[in-house]
Image (spheres, rainbow, N blue to C red):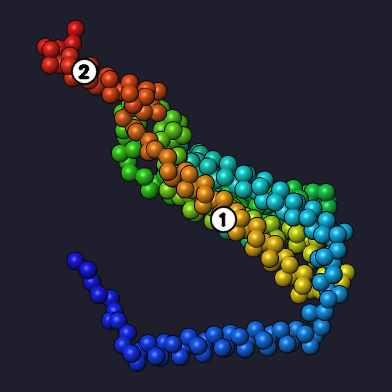
Amino acid sequence: MSTVLYDNPGPRARFVNRIVGIVTVLLVLVGIFWTIRLLNQNGQLEGDLWEPFVTPTYMELIGRALLETLKAAAFAIAGAVVFGVIFGIGKLSEHAWIRWPSWLVVEFFRAVPLLMLIIFIWTLNGLQLDKSFQSLVIGLVLYNGSVLAEVFRAGINALPKGQSEAAYALGMRKYQVMTSVLLPQAVKIMLPSIISQCIVALKDTSLGYTILAPGLTTEMKSIWLTFQNQLPATLVLLMLYLVVNLILEVLARWAQKKFSGGHKLNLTAVGVLGETEEEISAERVRTTHSGQGGGVY
């Protein structure tokens, strides 16, 4: 049975919608024209302000800064995933001496603002420039890892209890149930949230300029202080982060599709007892035939 949520618009409603659409487009175009005109009057569109972004020397510096940003993001994402798995499982532990410290660590680093956390870690490292990259990565790992810990915990709790009960019935130990049965399925369920948090970690690398960590924002800040081209530098920085995030999102969606397209875990035997589906089927046939023949000797 289908339910009609709204009536099809009549001629008058279609005319009104068309007028509203045209007016909206015109207002957007007027806003763009007014913005460009204002920027031109303030000299923000002069060619000299864009020159650093077509000069080979500065392009090389920006390229190196981009690599530093990607390196920081890679370390932060990898560390955050490991941190999230460990403390997410720790919050589910039956032992209070594991569960409560895990809960305390996760809630603390989730509550602290990331910028304050990065500056605090850099202060502990003596405010040394050679420790700024390390301080940025540690801050990103602690904050994003705490968020991912909740993601993994929620994913594991969302699984039916029959999954773990079936695994225990097959004689699996607790760590085997968690690592071989529950965690892989939780990752599959929560993969979109994990991907989103990884993208957040990449964008949060922009906070590195506050402690002069090598990266795009630090390099762009140096360029706009030198050439006083705040708007061009900001637009170029925005486009670089946009392109990198779009590429990461495309790769993540491809990985999600490949991961979700795999075969589901068969808790009855496959992957648990180390037997293949053919061996299990043959065993069932032999058992059935033996039962029909008067029992198994």
Q: Which residue is mark 1?
A: 249
Residue at (39% x, 46% y) in the render: 157
> What kind of residue is marked 2?
Thr
Give the Cα distance between marks 1 and 2.
Answer: 50 Å
Towards the viewer: 54 or 92: 54
The vertical placement of 145 against 234, above or below, is above
Which image quarter holds the N terminus? bottom left
Give me the residue at 79% from left, 79% from top. Answer: 45
How many numbered discs? 2
Instruction: Identify the residue at image location x=34%, y=92%.
Output: 12
Mark 1, other Cα within 10 Å: few <14 / some 14–19 / many ≥20: some
In the foreground, 217 or 140: 217
**Left or right: 35, with 92 as reference point:** right
Quadrant of the frame with the C terminus: top left
Q: Is residue 167 at all visible to an observer of this figure? A: yes
Q: Earlier in the sequence, mark 1 or mark 2?
A: 1
> Is residue 120 left or right of 50 when viewed as pictured?
left
| SS assignment at label 2 | helix
Relative depth, front residue between 167 and 62: 62
Above or below, comparing residue 38 to residue 264 in the picture: below
Q: For the view shown, which residue lies furthest in the top direction?
A: 297
Q: Position of residue 96 (x, y in %)?
A: 47, 40
Q: Tag 1's secondary structure?
A: helix
Q: In screen coordinates, is 44 left or right of 101?
A: right
Residue 213 in view in this figure:
no
Instruction: Sort mark 2 into few (<14), some (14-19) or many (20+) by Cα contacts within 10 Å.
Output: some
Q: Toward which corner of the image does residue 62 lie, by quadrant?
A: bottom right
Residue 73 in percent (x, y) is at 67, 51
In-image side of 2 versus 128 (left or right): left
> Where does the image place residue 179, in percent across and percent down from the top left?
46, 34
Residue that mark 2 sits on: 287
Q: Amino acid at mark 1?
A: Glu
